[in-house]
Image (spheres, grey):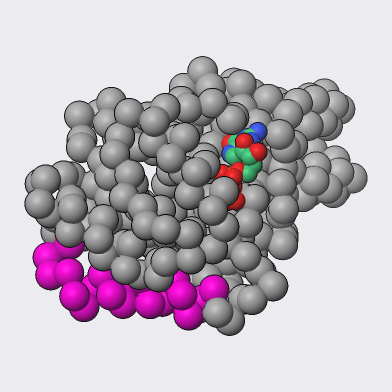
Amino acid sequence: MQKLFQGLRRTKERLFGSLQGIFSGGALGADALEELEGVLLSADLGPEAAERIIERLRKQAGAAAGPGDYRRIIAEELLSIIRETPAPEPPKGRPRVIVVVGVNGVGKTSTIGKLAYLFKNEGHSVILAACDTFRAAAVEQLELWAERAGVPIVRQKSGADPAAVAFDAVQSAKAKDADIVIVDTAGRLHTKVNLMDELKKIFNVLSTRMEGVGLESWLVLDANTGQNSLRQAEAFTAALPVSGLVLTKLDSTAKGGAIVTIQRNLRVPVIYVGVGEGLSDIERFDPELFVSAMLGE
Ligand SMILES: Nc1nc2c(ncn2[C@@H]2O[C@H](COP(=O)(O)OP(=O)(O)O)[C@@H](O)[C@H]2O)c(=O)[nH]1
Ligand SMILES: [Mg+2]
């Protein structure tokens, strides 16, 4: 929880300071509301959320309202927007298999290491599958994370068929009665069509040849990339049934509001957020905490 607050520090600084300035001017007139809209947009909250917030302030913040009321109204509206895309229950089936996808550099492999550590500390047995077989270094990087998290990894030689590695890993999980398999995948963009075909194949092999698994796919997005994330996301959601998002690098952006825009546009919930490069720098996304961390309460 502390980490989320620390991670959203830059977003909070941007929002909080500007809100103080706007609110200290007394009643919210048209100029103040316009300025406020600009501030909300600069934190990447997106035009729709910004408009909804302004609309509510216009309606509900009467002459007697003060900064505390304004802040409460903004928080309530943000929460209600976020809650329109609730996180689903994990799919039934065993083991739970999470295929993690996203373009290069967004933080897939780190996220997988952190998730493995988190799930293990929650009492689950976890196996990692090294399906980014395109680069030898990628497998080694995942191995390092597996070591740090203290969980086993299933890998094959570099260049192996990613779907075959995923199949192996799930088979191994079944044999060991493990709870969760997390699948690392490639993210190279210059061969986008091939990448999507490769991801589809992993997904298809697991869904058709592995009976009874709880299969899902999570898309990792870098909070810094703003609107670009949306375009990336569309390519992945067109190819796969993406059921959850992980937003990374919240600690290095003042645009933490992107969470709201992205889940709103994709209608896919944010499930975890990355707040640093360390093993425990990940948090389950908690809308209420997120809103208070962002608005600086
Ligand atoms: N500050 C920060 N850096 C992160 C976070 N997650 C990943 N990174 C960094 O992003 C870079 C790319 O991460 P990696 O896991 O290799 O991405 P991948 O290519 O998608 O597998 C690495 O330098 C990570 O340390 C995060 O939450 N915060
Ligand atoms: Mg990687």
- The segment highlighted magenta reads 195-213
Residue 158 percent across, percent down from the top left? 48, 59
Which residue is nearer to you in this view: 117 or 47? 117
Quarter occupied by residue 103: bottom right
Q: Ligand 1 falls in which quarter?
A: top right
Most foreground residue, 71 or 134: 134
Residue 71 in the image: above or below residue 152: above
Vertical side of 206 occupied by 95: above or below: above
Farthest residue, direction right: 31
Residue for point 54% across, 26% down? 278
13 lies left or right of 200: right
Quadrant location of the C terminus in the rendered image: top right
Question: Compared with residue 176, is residue 19 higher up or lower down, i.e. above or below?
Answer: above
Magenta-highlighted stretch: main secondary structure? helix
Extreme residue in the front direction: 157
- Inspect the magenta stretch and tell me whether residue 211 lies in it: yes
Relative height, residue 112 to residue 3 (above, below): below
Q: Give residue 14's position: percent from left, percent from top.
A: 78, 32
**Residue at the location (32% across, 28% down)?**
150
Q: Position of residue 243 (x, y in %)?
A: 38, 62
- Is residue 273 visible in the rendered structure shown here? no
Residue at left offset 80%, top offset 46%: 42
Q: Is residue 166 visible?
A: yes
Count all numbered tags in the image, as a single digit: 0
Within the magenta stretch, is there residue 290?
no
Residue at 54% in and 53% down: 136
Image position, residue 67 (x, y; %)? 70, 26
Nearer to me, 186 or 85? 186
Would residue 221 appear left or right of 38 to someone viewing this image?
Answer: left
